[in-house]
Image: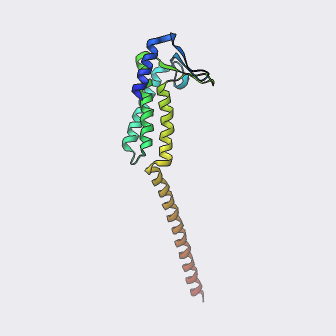
Amino acid sequence: MLLVDQLTKLAVRAVGDALHVTVIPGVIDFLFVRNIGAAFSMGEGHGIAFAVLALAVIVAIAVYLIRAPQLAHLEVVGMAMVAGGAIGNAIDRLAFGFVTDFIATTFIDFPVFNVADIGITLGVVLALFGYMFLSPAAREVDATAELNARDEARAKRKAKQRGERARKIRERNER
């Protein structure tokens, strides 16, 4: 993902401002845009802060992947895509002061984006799907909740039984 991102951005910067190619008429154009903001051109003028944030995200992902007891393969793939996209955009920010965006949708009004943005977005979706539906750790959390509910029900039954025994003893003593 990172390699494809960097190679496509290199090609786009090589062509420069002259780039405007209709890839699929009425759907996608390639158009060189210097994005000085964050994702999808939001937050312009804070490039260094976004690069630092990207590095923090990468560190957080690495820590999560190292410390998580069990992960679904899809979770790992998704996290790797997010990290790769964050690295790709951070490289641009630090090297050029902007992120090279070039994929423009023409069928909807949407900000111009790049391969790294696709990786980040798709990676988040895959990681969440992997965690929610495939992760052994998520299943353990569900099992823990079931065990806790069972233990609580057992404790209530025992308390009720103790209360009944105490009532019977009181009744016997009152006779």
| Quadrant hosting residue 110 | top right
Q: Residue at x 44, y 42 (%)?
A: 74
Q: Determine whether 14 is above or below 138 in the image.
A: above
Q: Position of residue 82 (x, y in %)?
A: 45, 33
Q: Of residues 141 and 129, which is closer to you in this image?
A: 129
Q: Quadrant of the N terminus?
A: top left
Q: Residue at x 40, y 27 (%)?
A: 2
Residue projecting furthest to the bottom: 175
Q: Of residues 160 and 83, which is closer to you in this image?
A: 83
Residue projecting furthest to the left: 66
Q: Of residues 136 and 50, which is closer to you in this image?
A: 136
Q: Position of residue 97 (x, y in %)?
A: 45, 16
Q: Residue at x 58, y 80 (%)?
A: 167
Q: Position of residue 67 (x, y in %)?
A: 37, 44
Q: Of residues 126 and 152, which is closer to you in this image?
A: 126
Residue projecting furthest to the right: 108
Total count of labels: 0
> Is residue 107 shown left or right of residue 149?
right
